[in-house]
Image: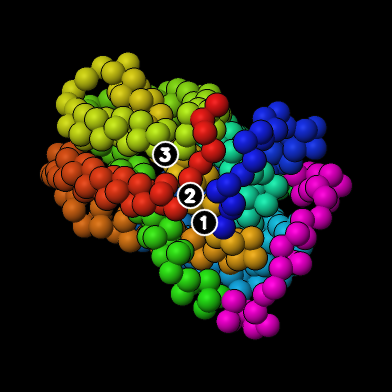
Amino acid sequence: MDNPAAPAQVRIKFSRYEKVVIGILGFLQFTIILDFMIISPLGAIVMPSLHISPQQFGLAVSSYAFSAGVSGFLAAGFADRFDRKRLLLFFYFGFMLGTLLCALATTYPLLLLARIVTGFFGGVIGSVVLAITTDLFPLERRGRVMGVISTAFAASQVLGLPAGLYLTSRWDWHAPFFAVIAIGVPAGVLIMLFMRPIVGHLALQQEHSALKHLINTIAEPRYRLAFLLVMLLPTGGYMLMPFGTAFIVNNVGLAFTVLPVIYLVTGVSAIFVGPLVGKASDSFGKFPMFCVGSMVTLIMVPIWTHIGHVPLATVIVINVILFAGIFSRMIPAQALISAIPDPGKRGAFNAVSASLQQFAGGVSAAVAGWLIVQRPDGSLAHFDWLGYVVMAIALVTFALMYRVHKQVPEAAPR
């Protein structure tokens, strides 16, 4: 666990090397999220091309998440036994191999296998990135790092989805995966050339058995609260986002063609909001920033889930503010939770957390699908019920985060 009695004077500015590392890790996250998101909008082309049903395509999409969840648990026992740089390269190039298999897939079984391979390797990378961030940057500066890295999600929305759809229309559905490889392989080369070995944790005493290391990590009482939080925090996104486009088109009444505009504006705003939230978390305190984000979320979720026929501009404004609230919760929460595990268990802790998050996401999406009912006219009934569930979970996470905040005293805000 990070030392709460950190020195009062903490270096605020990042060194040149630290800036390079932050940039590499952020770009790495961008390629991972891009690959995960890019297949969803390709369904209209992939299904007729491979002669598969919507259920089969849905399995191809979800197989990534389930494979990632399994690999996280399998990797947790070994996550603290290697140089984190080498571990990152191993899983990243495995992820690139899976993406290449997607690009070369010509049948449904091959595509399904490719998504399983991609998820198996890609699902661990986020936890390794988080472990590296925790190793290299003290808690007092971690919010800014998390803020920059978290913009990968927004950037993939702004650049990835439109680019993927364009490449598909210009060539075919394989093209976006080749594009991910084209930008992803250079990122791996940058890691090999510029990132220094990260081996400080290897000097710490560890269990002889990888299985025992995993069991001890899961059984550690101090980690249980954090594991519960990493499952609950992203629940709102997993429940609301899958039905967001259908709600906008069928309930709000906007044309399908305006959806890229909504996502583009929201993504661009999130690119700017993420670093600002990270800096504010370091300057004013991570728990106070989490409180602000929680209040914004609790206000905007019922507004979002109850809007009727409103203009496009209104939908964009609501969406932008809602995502700002979500970012203002996730970034400081990730920074605080990162201070919980001991240095010798960071890799295992983050791998288990990533797995739990993947499984929780699948359950959340399933619950949302069970609650939502589509009327004969195509509109969604009970979408407001999702809002109530998300608000209730947000209140629970607020109480739990307060307990984490008490476990991880922060330095005095600057």
Mark 2–mark 1 distance (CA, rounded to whole Å): 7 Å
Tag of residue 213: none
> Amino acid type of disc 3?
Phe
CA distance for labels 1 and 3? 14 Å
SS assignment for the magenta stretch, majority: helix
Residue 406 percent across, percent down from the top left: 41, 49
**Which residue carries the number 3 mark?**
287
| Residue 412 percent location from the top left of the image | 52, 33
Q: Do we see residue 145 in this rendering? A: no
Q: Residue at x 54, y 38 (%)?
A: 411
Q: Which residues are magenta?
A: 186-213
**According to the image, label 2 marks what residue?**
408
**Residue 302 makes an appearance in the image:** yes
Tell which circle, 2 or 3, labels the residue nearer the N-terminal end: 3
Q: Dot 1 lies on which element?
A: loop
Position of the N terminus, as image quadrant, is bottom right
Who's the residue at 67% across and 75% down the image? 206
Label 2 amino acid? Val
